[in-house]
Amino acid sequence: MKTHVSISVFAADILKIGSELKTVKEHKADSIHIDVMDGHFVPLFGFNNMWAKAVGDYVCLNRDIHFMVYPTEEMIDRFMDEKVDTITLHLDSAPEDVLLYGISYIRECGKRTGIAISPHTKVERLLPFLDHAMEILVMSTAPGEENSCFVEETYERIERIKQLIGERDISIAVDGGLNAQRARRCIASGADKIIMGRTYFAETHKGDLIREIQQAAYA
């Protein structure tokens, strides 16, 4: 089974986003990753629902919506449409009961559900969600911060989360500061999905990069 590669649209050059996005489909990425940030839970602002839909319709790929916000049911509703595959909430964004309700609501709407964990949050805090979430998003940089550095402990955290998941059917995604070498190490540690932004858009041979990561699971 190949590794899923999702391209983070937030890293595209906003002044030539059309041509940047065209390459994502041409080079056969598996999905696009859209960061929704509110300037409150994290410092930056990200995509709104109208931009997210426009981007998804343009590339004709499934969308993963990554909420770096204090979530509400109304906000989640605004991003629901047929091309959305996975909606991920942040572990630190709300109390446990609110997050569990949000996960349940997303699943009732027919979408895959994810829980994101920040680099310095203890992985054991995921335990109450492992019977409910379908994906764990391991943040390898500080969420919603410009120029944050890759956290080397990410590999060990992936391995530990893999142990906690056990036999459950839960995928592990990784997001933040990934290049090809780091992506391969994450996959070797147990990751199923790689989210890549700046490295992809800066790469001259984009198709080769995507294929390399997709095939890394076979190595």
Image (tube, rainbow, N blue to C red):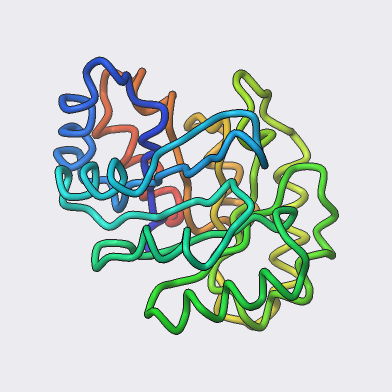
Residue at x 64%, y 29% (from the top left corner): 43
Residue at x 36%, y 18% (from the top left corner): 202
Using the rendered image of the protein, determine whether residue 119 is visible from the camera's viewpoint.
yes
How far across and down, in percent of the image, does residue 178 sit? 54, 33
- Residue 135 lies in quadrant: bottom right
Give the camera-side residue of 22 and 100. Answer: 100
Give the camera-side residue of 17 and 149. Answer: 17
Using the rendered image of the protein, determine whether residue 219 is visible from the camera's viewpoint.
no
Question: In the drawing, does residue 75 fall left or right of residue 138?
Answer: left
Residue at x 57%, y 29% (from the top left corner): 44
Q: Quadrant of the N terminus?
A: bottom left
Question: In the drawing, does residue 81 fall left or right of residue 43?
Answer: left
Up/down of 68 relative to 63, above or below: above
How far across and down, in percent of the image, does residue 127 sit? 78, 73
Question: In the drawing, does residue 206 fall left or right of residue 191?
Answer: left
How far across and down, in percent of the image, does residue 129 sit? 70, 74
Question: In the drawing, does residue 75 fall left or right of residue 31?
Answer: right
How far across and down, in percent of the image, does residue 69 sit? 60, 48
- Residue 172 lies in quadrant: bottom right
Residue at x 50%, y 59% (from the top left corner): 192
Count of numbered tags: 0
